[in-house]
Image (spheres, helix red, strand yellow):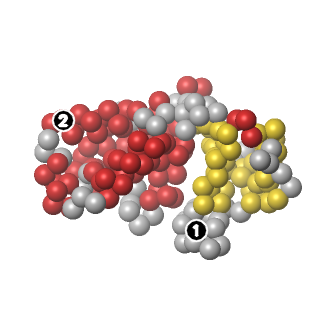
Amino acid sequence: MEIMAARALNRFLEKISHAERKKMILSEELCNLMQDLAQTIPEVGDYETQVAISEALCRISVKKWRDEAAQRWFVKDRIAAAFKCITDEEFETDCRKFLNEMNESLGDKRKVYSYPCITAYLDMDEVTKPADEKLECFWIDFNLESFSISFFINDADEALWDAVSLEKELVHGFNVEGIDKYSYSTTVKWLHK
C-alpha cells in the first residue's frame, strides 16, 4: 500500500464517529481487511507508510477491540504488546516504539532500518529531534523499498513534527558512526535542487 493511499484512508477514517467504528468492526470483510493491513506493515519498506498503516488500524478499531485483535494481527507477543501500547495522545512516540520493535524482530529480512542518533546533520546543518519529552532519541530511517532516508525534526512554528524524506536521487552520501551500542551520529550529504 502506498503512502498516499494510506493517508487517504486515514482522512476518511478521521471523519467516522466512535459509534460508526463500533458497527464497522462487526463486518467480516473489514476484519479481513484489517488483518491484511496488519500483515502488510512488515512488508512495507518505508517507515512513513508503516506509520500511516498503523494509524489506520488504530483509527478503525476501538481501543477495547484493538487489544484483542492485536493478538491475531501480530504473531509475536512482544509486537502485539507494543501495538496495544499505542495511545491517541502519544501516537507518534508509541508508534515509533511499536515499529522499531517490529522491524528489529525481522532481523536481516527487515525493509526499514532505524538508528537512534545523538546528533544528525543534513550537509553541514545540525537538525534536532522533535521537541517531545517522551521521544528518547532522534531516529533516522533507511527505507529499502522507497530508497529514501527519512526522519522527523523539530518544527519551531508548529506543534507537530516536520517530516523530511530524501529520495535516493537527492542523497549524495551518508555516514553513520556508532557512538556506543545504542546510539549513532549520522551525516547525510544531499544535493540541493
Residue type, mark 2 in image: Glu
Residue 132 numbered tag: 1
Residue 30 numbered tag: none
The reply to whether residue 8 is visible in this rendering is: yes
Q: Residue at x 23, y 34 (%)?
A: 32
Quarter occupied by residue 80? top left
The reply to whether residue 180 is visible in this rendering is: no
- The one of 154 and 113 positioned closer to us in this rendering: 154
Which secondary structure lies at badge 1?
A: loop
Q: Residue furthest right?
A: 124
Residue type, mark 1 in image: Asp
Q: Position of residue 28 (x, y in %)?
A: 15, 36
- The one of 65 and 111 positioned closer to us in this rendering: 111
- Identify residue for label 2: 29
Quarter occupied by residue 1? top left
Q: Position of residue 184 (x, y in %)?
A: 75, 48
Q: Residue furthest top?
A: 109
Instruction: State left or right for residue 23 relative to residue 158.
Output: left
Q: Position of residue 72 (x, y in %)?
A: 28, 36
Q: Residue at x 15, y 60 (%)?
A: 19
The earlier-in-sequence mark between 2 and 1 is 2
Q: CA distance from mark 2 to mark 1?
A: 38 Å
Q: Is label 2 or label 1 in front?
A: 2
Which secondary structure lies at badge 2?
A: helix
- The one of 19 and 114 positioned closer to us in this rendering: 19
The local crowd at label 1, few if under 14, some if 14 to 19, many if 20 or more residues have their Cα within 10 Å, is some
Q: Look at the numbered discs 2 and 1 and tell me whether their residues touch, using CB distance below 8 Å.
A: no
Q: Position of residue 22 (x, y in %)?
A: 16, 54
